[in-house]
Image: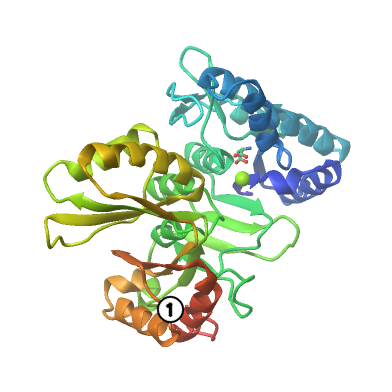
Amino acid sequence: MGLLIVQKYGGSSVADAERIKNVARRVAESARLGHRVVVVVSAMGKTTDGLLALAAAITSTPDPREMDMILSTGEQVTIGLLAMALQSLGHPACSFTGSQIGMVTDAGHTRARIKRITAERIHAALDAGRVAVIAGFQGTTEGGDITTLGRGGSDLTGVALAAALKADVCEIFTDVDGVYTADPNVVPDARKLPRVSYDEMLEMAALGARVLQARSVEFAKKYNVPVHVRSTFKPDPGTLVTREDHSMEDVVVTGITHDRGQAKVSILRVPDRPGIASRVFGALGAQNIVVDMIVQNISRDGLTDISFTLPRADRTRAETVLTGLAREIGAEGVAADDRVAKVSVVGVGMRSHAGVAARMFETLSAEGINIQMISTSEIAVSCVIEDKYTELAVRALHDVFALGAERGV
Ligand code: ASP
Ligand code: MG
């Protein structure tokens, strides 16, 4: 008896007709091996960005319901084309939209959350010997309005379907061939990891390793869905994202990640009294600006500095909000800096091994790199440094934690 496999192909894997035919061949191969295959696809190439730009040319305050009406069209094109490509190979296939498979979400347009998946039509298609080709990223409200699941949401569709169908594995096909000990473009001897735990993958996703959408990893962890990240263009196995086991804890550091998409904002000489932080971050939250690291200095003369990092794209908005607020709360001013990067060391082994942070700081200091901010979690230590030292820092840390060398897994 074959397996039940959910395969998800991202935008770059289906960017043009040739690539869609290539995907069809890979899907047909799995089906010929006797597996039942459900395929989830993204919109072709940069289609979603194009649709967003179109909407932006009409209005700067788009109605989220209408936004979803537009965004959901991208994936609908891909499913029709892929089903046709499979049929051309002589393999029965049928495409379905989110609403056709009963992907029911809340009404949080453009970032909807999945409530349930009925999947009846998928079962029927599989029972009839067809490949079911599903539009990723989209769902429907109870009332029948189209919703989308947030950027990168096709990963979530894949994982959620694998959970709902109790599939043996969710394969995420993409243009990288797995999860590496560091970005191979930065560290030439970075190694592909055969396995990582859900928690490590979550940290890496949040810390800038753009392999899987973070929400999809949370979902995979919750429902214990094995996720295999692999290349669309090569046959080799990739990285299995899976439940943590004892052997993983023996390895202290699994990988080094970096994120250059951040900016640092400081509010200078803020009166140090109750309610200030709440006003500052309340004001940012009201603008939907999500901050990451926050540091507040000890005050000496009743005044303190508050610094935080945020996505670089939100920097100007944050500055505008805070410049007004700074005046109201009697702060001296606001300073922002785009030339920062966050470098992190990640590994579940940190739970049981001390000294990782100290070694990281020592390594950065030996390279003459100043640490501007630090944050830690149970399985990660992150430092904000000056942008131009990113490569140097990542390479030095990769070396110090011996990630390039062969090691037991
Ligand atoms: N097409 C959507 C996006 O670009 C969903 C996805 O690709 O996962 O965000
Ligand atoms: Mg994607």
Residue 71 image position (x, y, % from top left): 63, 28
Rendered position, 103 above or below 201: above
User: Which residue shows up at 60% across the image and 21% down it?
Assistant: 59
Residue 72 seen in the current view: no
| Residue drawn at 11 percent across, 55 percent down | 302
Residue hosting label 1: 369
Quadrant location of residue 381?
Answer: bottom left
- Say above or below: 317 vs 254: above
Q: Name the residue rendered at 67%, 46% in the picture.
A: 9
User: In the drawing, does residue 396 fall left or right of residue 71?
Assistant: left
Residue labelled 1 has its Cβ within 8 Å of some atom of ligand 2: no
Q: Amino acid at mark 1?
A: Ile
Ligand 1 sits in which quadrant?
Answer: top right
214 sits to left or right of 280: right
Tell me the crowding category of disc 1: few under 14, some 14 to 19, or many 20 or more residues within 10 angstroms, Cα based: some
Residue at the image position 11 percent from the left and 44 percent from the top: 274
Can residue 140 be seen here? yes
